[in-house]
Amino acid sequence: QVQLVESGGGLVQAGDSLRLSCAASGRTFSTYVMGWFRQAPGKEREFVAASSSSGRSTDYADSVKGRFTISRDNAKNTVYLEMNSLKPEDTAVYYCAAQRGGSLRGRYDYWGQGTQVTVSS
């Protein structure tokens, strides 16, 4: 089992950048596929980005492709989401998630508590 704690959210203006971090517990972080999801008020949770266990493969939602970058540091048990050129529609609670060995857009088993990102226009 793995526990996930997100940080780095906040209030920014449109066009600004923000980096989210997700710290994972345990000694098997490098075996997990890691993903970022978000949920805006009144909307369903949606996929944002994911990284394979090695970090060599990544996947992004079309809405963030070219603006967001997922990366991971397996030595630090941490996955990051670098968000650039933020838009008001990026406003949401962002969740980190982990799964063992599935596809990047597959079912995730472990979730963090979320961190709020608010982008003002």
Image (cartoon, rainbow, N blue to C red):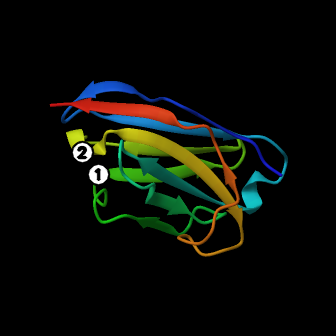
Upstream in the sequence, badge 2 or badge 1? 1
Identify the secondary structure beneath mark 2. Answer: helix
Decide: is 4 above or below 68: above
Position in image of residue 55 (x %, y %): 58, 61
Image quadrant containing the C terminus: top left
- Quarter occupied by residue 54: bottom right
Residue 21 got which mark? none
**Could you classify mark 1 by the number of other residues whose Cα lies within 10 Å: few (under 14), some (14-19), or many (20 or more)?**
some
Q: Is residue 41 left or right of residue 54?
A: left
Residue at 45% of width from left, 67% of height from top? 59
Disc 1 target residue: 67
Q: Is residue 1 left or right of residue 71?
A: right
Residue at 46% of width from left, 59% of height from top? 49
Decide: is 82 above or below 60: above
Q: Is residue 72 left or right of residue 88?
A: right
Position in image of residue 98 (x %, y %): 66, 56
Residue at 41% of width from left, 52% of height from top? 69
Disc 2 versus disc 1: nearer the observer: 2
Decide: is 121 above or below 78: above
Does residue 91 appear in the picture of this structure?
Answer: yes
Q: Is residue 31 left or right of residue 106?
A: right
